[in-house]
Amino acid sequence: MSLSKIRLPKGMRALVLIISAALVYGFLNAYSNRLLLPSAPFIALRPQVVLPFFLGLVFGPWVGFLTGFLGNMIGDALCGYGCWTFWNWHIANGIYGLLPGLACYFGLKEIRTLRRFVIMETIVVATNLVAIGVAVLADLFWLKTMQFPESLNSWILPALITNIVLSFVLVPLLLVFVKFIVITVETRITLVLSWLIVSIVVISATAVTWTVWNDLTSQAASVQAFYSAGIVTVLVVIIGFLISVFLAHRITDPLANLGQAARQIEQGEYQLPVLDTLDKRSDEFGQLATVMRSMASQIEARETRLKNQVAELKIEIDRTKQDEDVREIVESDYFKALRQKARGFRTTSRIDKEEEIKDATPKDDESSSI
């Protein structure tokens, strides 16, 4: 599937897409409620949280918002919580699709560079913070069902930690599938490094959680430690991602400069200022930049030499052509006829002059005799 083949739905298509996606999201929410997190009576492990984000980014903000909003409402109804009991969390789930959709409208159309990939993952984290923040503030000012600080471990941290980690891993995976993330050197390196770091962190955290799961369900201190470790996990994931971005940047920037230099050579530019810092490096990139600059100089010298040869050849060709044109004119029947006429004119003129001279000579003799 390619993003270029995906058409933004309108009218009935949009309505069908929203209803279908909301039903899927609602049923997945109802099913995943069996996987409640420790000390969290309403918060479960929900990989499907990436669905509104994905749909919003690909199809627009309203598709994403309504998928999350209606889907969470359907899920709560299926679980017996009622359609409007936790309306603040319906809005929060809608925000999961709204903010990425707005980012799409503001230019995040396709991800093929490291910069856009970082923007996308930043939106993932920011969307989670804003969505859960809105839900918490709505409860604080209107619903008042949360009790602080107890709700920190029973509502806020479980939702925030799991959603950030799941979104961080699964959203890029879905975007790669529809080619919203274009696989380039930059995106490939970033994906591999970030997934590797996230996988190590998540596997380690899962292994630790599995060994102490029974204690987590009964001891408040263990629960506190568990969610504190979860916060550390999220921070490690984010820091690890930033490190992977830095490493990818160190690898892809020289490649981008070399690619730009190649395009300049293709366009006939041989000075290559883009390699000024790169060819000073002692690694393979520096060696390749040095070779490319030398190659550009040789191509420029060869091209100059060829241009001079072509100019000389053109002059020679012009002279040859001129001689051929003259020969063609001289050997033509018309020119020969003109030449014959010219000879005739010259002969006639010579005879006339001789006759004039003959006529003039006796007159001189007669005058002398007198």
Image (spheres, grey):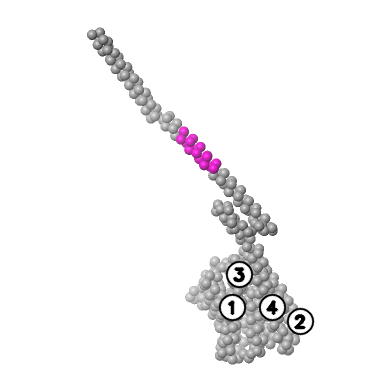
Assess whether residue 157 is covered by the magenta stretch.
no
Q: How many marks?
A: 4
Task: Tell me which amino acid carries mark 4.
Answer: Thr
Q: What percent of the width, then of the height, locates residue 115?
A: 59, 68
Task: Give the Cα distance between marks 1 and 3.
Answer: 15 Å
Report the residue at 46% width, 35% height from top.
322
- Residue 211's tag is 2
Label 1 packing within 10 angstroms: few (<14), some (14-19), many (20+): many
Residue at (55%, 77%) from the top-left corner? 99
What residue would you read off at disc 3? 117
Give the quadrant of the N terminus: bottom right
Q: Looking at the image, which is closer to me, 306 or 202?
A: 306
Residue tagged 1: 127
**Nearer-N-terminus badge (1/4):** 1
Residue 167 point in image, percent of width and height: 63, 76
What residue range appears in magenta? 308-323
Mark with earlier residue (1, 2) = 1
Determine contact: label 3, label 4, CB under 8 Å.
no
Q: CA distance from mark 1 to mark 4?
A: 18 Å
